[in-house]
Image (tube, rainbow, N blue to C red):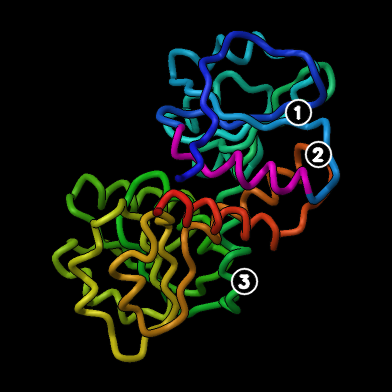
Amino acid sequence: MAQQAHQESYTGPDQGGRRAAVLGSPIAHSLSPVLHRAAYAGLGLETWTYDAFDVDEKGIAGFLAELDGRWAGLSLTMPLKRAVIPLLDEVSATAASVEAVNTVVFGENGRRLGDNTDIPGMIAALDERGVESVEHATVLGAGATAASALAALTRVCKGEVTAYVRSEERAREMRGWGERLGVTVRTEDWARAAEGLRAPLVVSTTPVGATDGLAQAVPAVGGTLFDVVYAPWPTALAAAWSGAVVGGLDLLVHQAVLQVEQMTGRRPALGPMRAAGEAELRARAS
């Protein structure tokens, strides 16, 4: 049987050691508890706990208001990454660049410090596969994850990024993010997305199933595919890919390493966290 993610309705802080949690709605699918608890075990942080709470935009202010000094930090997923910003005392330049906070750390006197570890997590995941610099890149999809991908590509891509999207509204959004982040973004209709698979780096930011139709168009010699989906894995596109593949779990683990380091002041080992995530995904699939 698959182990279910711990999920609670918040009723106020309990007694014990240091606390952290992931918030979002829905939240039962989150791998964050598995990854962070593996990190705590490796670091010997026996009094630390990490849970998951179902919290939406209407509940985030009340949740934050009831936290006490035992709380070290929070991980945030949808729909809270933007909603939390007005409730913070400070937001990092990285998070501000994409208007998305996925990490809150509580500083002195309860100051709420917001950051985004998705962007450096993407860069680290690519670097682990030896992708440090490419001449141009493709982004499949639009939205918040695509914006984070563009921000990461400012460090990786020397030239133009082509974004394949499904509407002119999305195209305008992506061009706008490009201007804001300092990336040259050319937009193309999703119907031509197969052409983008020939880029040395392809970043798919789309939901499960959205790129399945592109699997038959994979080039014989592909570059690197970064597919942000982690379950079910592999996606049809990732399974068909002829080059190197970076998956959503790679991103989750790398960004979680950075979150744990910010919250605890100690950097965890990546290997045990990845192994714990892989084991959990296998258990869920069974």
Q: Relative to residue 243, is residue 30 depicted above or below? A: above
Q: Position of residue 271 (x, y in %)?
A: 69, 63
Q: Position of residue 6 (x, y in %)?
A: 54, 30
Q: Amino acid at mark 3?
A: Asp
Q: Is residue 94 left or right of residue 112?
A: left
Which label's residue is closer to the chain start, 2 or 3? Answer: 3
From the image, tell me which residue sits under label 2. 264
- Would you call the spot at circle 2 few (<14 residues within 10 Å), some (14-19), or many (20 or more)? some
Q: Relative to residue 247, is residue 107 depicted above or below? A: above
From the image, tell me which residue sits under label 1. 72
Quarter of the image where one finds residue 113: top right
From the image, tell me which residue sits under label 3. 127
Secondary structure type for disc 2: helix
Which label's residue is closer to the chain start, 1 or 2? Answer: 1
Secondary structure type for disc 1: strand
Judged by depth in the image, the label closer to the viewer, 2 or 3, is: 2
Secondary structure type for disc 3: helix
Segment colored magenta:
28-41
Asked if residue 165 shows in the view, the reply is yes
Secondary structure mostly seen in the magenta stretch: helix
Kindly identify the residue that appears in the image at 79 percent across and 26 percent down: 18
Q: Is residue 225 left or right of residue 170?
A: right
Kindly identify the residue that appears in the image at 83 percent across and 39 percent down: 45
CB under 8 Å between discs 1 and 2: yes
Q: Position of residue 283 (x, y in %)?
A: 48, 52
Q: CA distance from mark 1 to mark 2?
A: 7 Å
Q: Amino acid at mark 1?
A: Ala
Q: On the rendered image, what quadrant is the N terminus found in?
A: top left
Residue farthest to the left, as pictured: 191
